[in-house]
Amino acid sequence: MNAAPDPSARTSGTPVIGILGGTFNPVHFGHLRMAQELADALNLDTVRFIPAANPPHKDAPAISADQRAAMVKLAIAGNGTFVFDGRELHRAGASYTVDTLLSLREELGQQASITLFMGSDAFTKFDTWHRWQEIIQHCHIALVQRPQVRGHEHQLSKPLEIFLHNHYTENSDDLHQQPSGLVTMRQITALDISSTAIRHALKHGDSVRYLMPDSVFDYIRQHQLYQ
C-alpha cells in the first residue's frame, strides 16, 4: 500500500504538470488526445511534450530530432495546456527518463507535482529502464491503456507487481498532495493510431490524413518525410 499523502508536502501555487515523452515519429492524434484527457482527468496545469533525441529502447529514428520536434510544435500550437520541452534534444547520450526528471526538478523545485504518462504496454518493460526504481522518487506515473495491447502482454514481472502494489492509488487528488511516489491508471478514448502504422502508410503512398493535425500532415508532405 502506498504511504498516505502528506498534505503539507506541497504548498498552494506549486506547479502540477504532466510529461509525455517519446520519439513522436511522427506525432499524431493518439498522443494529443491522451495528453488532453489526462490533463483534464488529473487536473494538470500543463503537459510538457518532450521528444527523445536518442531513445535507449528503440533504434535511432531516420527522421532527425529537429524535424520530429518541429512536428510536435506544430501539433500542440494553440493549446494553452500543452508546452514543448526540448531539453532531451540538447543533451548528449541516450535520452534517459531519470535524467530528464532530475533536470525538471532542478527547474521546477522539489515540491512541484510531476506525473509521467506511460502506456500500459511500456510499463510491462519498465523494470528494464535505466535506474527504473529511482524514477518514482521524482514523479508520479499515470498508466493508460493502449488499444492494441491484449492478453498476455499485460503480464507483469514480480518486481513490477510489487512496485505497482506499493505505489498504486485510484484517487487522482493524491497526486496533488505530494510531488511524487504514486502510480494511477486511467481509461482514455481508444484511438488505435500508431506512429509505426503511419510510417508504413506513408512509405506505401497511402493517405494518413485525419490521423494527425493538418499542420503536421502538411509538414511531412512539404519535407517529403517517410518516403
Image: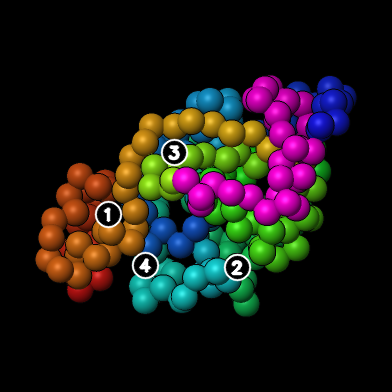
Q: CA distance from mark 3 to mark 4?
A: 22 Å
Q: Which residue is mark 3?
A: 34
Is 66 rendered above or below residue 111?
below
Q: Which residue is mark 4?
A: 67
Rendered image: mark on residue 216: 1
Magenta stretch in the rendered image: 151-180
Q: Amino acid at mark 4?
A: Gln
Figure quadrant of the N terminus: top right
Q: CA distance from mark 3 to mark 2?
A: 22 Å
Camera-side mark, 1 or 3: 3
Is 152 rendered above or below residue 182?
below
Instruction: Determine whether label 4 and label 2 are within 8 Å by CB.
Output: no
Label 1: which secondary element: helix
Label whose residue precedes the other's in the sequence (1 or 3): 3
Q: Residue at x 75, y 45 (%)?
A: 163
Q: Position of residue 149 (x, y in %)?
A: 44, 47
Is 225 rendered above or below residue 35?
below
Q: Which residue is mark 2?
A: 95
Q: Amino acid at mark 1?
A: Val
Q: Residue at x 66, y 63 (%)?
A: 129
Label 3: which secondary element: helix
Q: Residue at x 24, y 65 (%)?
A: 200
Q: CA distance from mark 1 to mark 3?
A: 17 Å
Label whose residue precedes the other's in the sequence (3 or 2): 3
